[in-house]
Image (tube, rainbow, N blue to C red):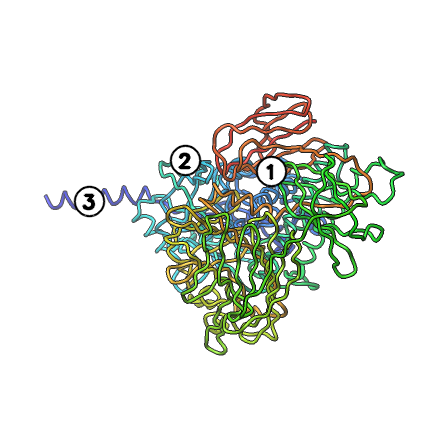
Amino acid sequence: MKRYILIFGFYLFWINTQAQQAYFVDGYHGGIYGHYPLWVTQFMVDKLAQHPEWKLGLEIEPETWDTVRVKSPAAYASFSKLVLDRRIEFTNPTYAQPYGYNISGESLIRQFEYGIKRLHRHFPGLTFTTYAVEEPCFTSSLPQLLKQFGFRYAVLKSPNTCWGGYARAYGGQLVNWIGPDGTSILTVPRYQSEALEENSTWQTTAWNNSVAFLQSSYASGITKPVGMCYQDAGWKNGPWLGYGNNIKNKSIYVTWREYFEEISDGSTQDDWRLSQEDFLVNLMWGSQALQRIGQQVRTAENSIVMGEKLSAMANIANQYVPAEQQFSQAWESLMMAQHHDSWIVPYNQLNSRQNWIEAIKNWTDSTNTLVKSLQDDAIGSFNVVTNANEEDVQYIRVYNTLPEERTEAVSVQLPALSATHNLVVSNSKGEHLPHVIRQEEEHMVLTFRPTVPSFGFASYVIQQGKQSAPVVEAVSFDAVGNCIIENENYRIVLDKSRGGSIHSLIAKKLDNKEFAIRDGSYVLGELSGFFYETHQFQSSKESPATFKVLADNGMIVKVEITGNIASHPYTQVITLEAGEPRIDFDLTIDWKNNVGIGEYKQGADWTENRRAYTNDRYKLKVMFPNSLERTKLFKNAPFDVCESRLDSTFFSQWDRIEHNIILNWVDLLEGGETYGLALFSDHTTSYGHGPDQPLSLTAQYSGIGLWGMDYKIDGPSRIKYALFPHRGKWDDANISAHSNRWNEPLVAVLQAEIPLIDCSYVKVEQPGLEISTMKVTDNDILLRLYNAAGDSGPQKISLGFLARSITEVLLNGEEQQRLATNEDLTGTGFKFQLPRHGIKTFLIKK
């Protein structure tokens, strides 16, 4: 009997092992800006011919092929003949291989759009089926973007280049990755059994189909495990696991498309609703290099989208046609600044002339210059001669690029002829608006608060007249020199003895809620960090501050705080605007010299699991202790808002990364959901929050980083941030909309002579809907909407112009449906449905 049992057991084992087979996706990553020696093209052609079992997944910067075609024409021609072969799959067509989580959603769309267009220019007929990358170029909203570009599958592995992070381990052979809008895409995850490699700070066990990886996969019920390695273009290994009869662990080379469609079951019941916090990513947050890169990219992102929107307004109003080639150049420059190497190896030499840091500044400067020219042209197209005989008359037009009516302070510089206080500002109805005129250096500046309709403009005239608006001073000082700022929204007390920190922050319109706390380890607004050369935490509250009132005129209040942190001087300007619930801060630290800030002085061993630059607890931070209790935290991501599940954001090891990224904002909500406190940042960086640490914004790290590079302080540090106390949850408080107002301010322009009219081109019926972009395309209008915080029910849009047709299109341009419209004397209306965090694009023929 025992003999039969043994035979039967052996039979079951044999059947089971026959059902198990290892697969491997090999390929190349790189490009002309990253790493792509020109011999690589012919090398791939030759090795594919030598090894018929070999297959390639490619993640090559699309612009690379421009250079290859010119400098290696024979290799380019040979490779072009193989591109449509089933042995080759292009898995990441983005223009510059961005990380994705650190840039805007609209930027991510353009990365795919421009990259696919460039690849199709070289390889007509190329299709894109699977999204797979070498580095953690992931973000939670990718499923809907990928599906709209025609992808069917995704891969969440990046086994051989996890320096900057990795996806959370989850599940087995396949999962349905569910995005925040509900879109599902079939995905190979980083298996729950796929561990981080021991004695490595950049790999998982899937990088070479090791025995440990395969055994753990089989033990988890994964019968067809697949590993992956996208080699850096320029490596001369050829087939990564060997070839012929010597392929490691008898693995079979496949493309990702082949694996999904011919090897795997092709479906699963495992639905994984990924949170943005399932992407465990980390860069050199707080270093001056990343601060400046983040600010330069953010500024360019904001300016180019605003430029597109203003050009669309001008096209609707007066048939203005923007120079499309200039916009393309502007986007291409910006997209290169979003390259993942821009962020993870900023000090690396890009070429003989410049490193990435220098290139990023040049690229973003180019974007901003091109956009400024296009924006000026668009605004200038509105000028017409209507009052040529009137003297001392000036016109101001204020443009609003957001889909909501806005009343905010704007300023314009007055020409010498009008530089007088005897002026009145009137709107299109003839009503006088309160205003102030002040001297700024050699110029007179006029400030007033226009009301501008949704996605449109309002017009104003300046004429001679008597100003009668009284100025109510908002700044005062108490007996011990504390500075008190008080307007209709807030009463803020700045503590002179504690570095100008906020002793009290009372929100008058929120039931006089006090947001500051007066006892505890930290005070609101202080700078605190560990200076490892002196082995101590130091704080700005340890030294007294001085105050200077820069503006106090009934419209704008600006108070400058001057203090020092560890003997290094800093200034911080606090700005309150009449009627605006946001409190703006502009911080400059004028470092005397390079000084070490962080957990400890790390050596040059960049393979250590413990890293000084990871632990934000020790970096210099702006601290925001507050009176909110039992808080939850929310944070935005590209086309997403995530509720945090973290008890603490702090970690100190590569294998214990927690998601601590602030893209545009994070928001604290107290347990009863009555009050909240939002924090806005002018650049992508990290934030801190934990049981023993209040909310904080990373302000400075200085020390050794990845690959032993010294991330030094080489000049002043300047960051801008804002606080927004509010009532209710983030969506009820319209946090996303307030962030957009900060990023896309009203544009006030002194124009020669224009009709004194107001106009709205897009009106949104329900709050929470955002215009991701509105641009001119072939003299038609392309409108893309994002449902940031609205209901998923029917949405209604009213256009302030007549439309011949409105067609819903996917991101790849494929037409979905032509929408029914209704028209009246003012324009065209249409309805559609869009889930929360969903995007839809409409092609509007005027």
- According to the picture, the residue beneath numbered tag 3 turns out to be 9
Q: What's the CA distance linking mark 1 and mark 2?
A: 45 Å
- Is residue 462 visible in the rendered image? The answer is yes
Amino acid type, callout 1 = Glu
Measured along the vertical axis of the image, is residue 801 above or below residue 693?
Answer: above
The foreground one among 240 and 136 is 136
- Element class at badge 2: loop
Q: What's the CA distance linking mark 1 and mark 3?
A: 71 Å
Measured along the vertical axis of the image, is residue 714 above or below residue 557?
Answer: below
Name the front one of labels 1 and 3. Answer: 1
Q: At x 37% / y 60%, what residue is drawn? A: 691
Q: Which mark is residue 404?
A: 1
Name the front one of labels 1 and 2. Answer: 1
Q: Earlier in the sequence, mark 1 or mark 2?
A: 2
Q: At x 55% / y 58%, what residue is drawn? A: 235
Expressed as whole percent of the image width and height from the top left, the position of residue 747 reads: 69, 45
Q: Which mark is residue 273?
A: none
Expressed as whole percent of the image width and height from the top left, the position of residue 507 reads: 50, 52
Q: Quadrant of residue 573?
A: bottom right
- According to the picture, the residue beneath numbered tag 2 turns out to be 266
The foreground one among 681 and 97 is 681
